[in-house]
Amino acid sequence: MKTSTKNLLIGVVVAILAILVASVIVNVALAFLAAAFKLALIAAVALVLVAVGWVWFGRIRSRD
């Protein structure tokens, strides 16, 4: 096998491996991003519910 053919083959294999590794890294990063976004949404909804409860409780207490 000629050196140029061997170098081309090595280059193709390295490129494929780089694409596979990059794909795994991006998938892991997106999974963490999705989890963080989900937690942020849960926290936002919890804060809205606490605010609604606080306003409701304040209205109930002000009638007394």
Image (cartoon, helix red, strand yellow):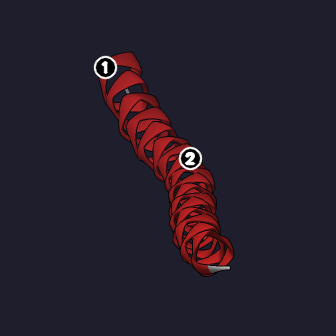
Residue sitting at the far front: 64
**Left or right: 43 with respect to 45?**
right
Number of other residues with Cα within 10 Å of mark 1, as a class: few under 14, some 14 to 19, many 20 or more: few
**Residue situated in front as seen by the camera: 23 or 10:** 23
**Left or right: 39 with respect to 1?**
right
> What residue is disc 1 on?
4
| Amino acid of disc 1 | Ser
Task: Using the image, determine if residue 14 lies above or below residue 39.
Answer: above
Number of other residues with Cα within 10 Å of mark 2, as a class: few under 14, some 14 to 19, many 20 or more: few
Q: Quadrant of the C terminus?
A: bottom right
**Left or right: 62 with respect to 61?**
left
Residue at image position (59%, 59%) is 47
**Residue situated in front as seen by the camera: 26 or 35:** 35
Task: Using the image, determine if residue 59 lies above or below residue 39.
Answer: below
Identify the element where label 1 is drawn. Answer: helix
Query: Residue 22 location, x and y as percent?
Result: 48, 41
Task: Using the image, determine if residue 37 lies above or below residue 5.
Answer: below
Residue at image position (41%, 45%) is 19
Residue at image position (52%, 72%) is 52
Looking at the image, can residue 13 be seen?
A: yes
> What residue is disc 2 on?
29
- Tally of marks: 2
Query: Residue 6 location, x and y as percent?
Result: 43, 29
Identify the element where label 2 is drawn. Answer: helix
Q: Which mark is residue 52?
A: none
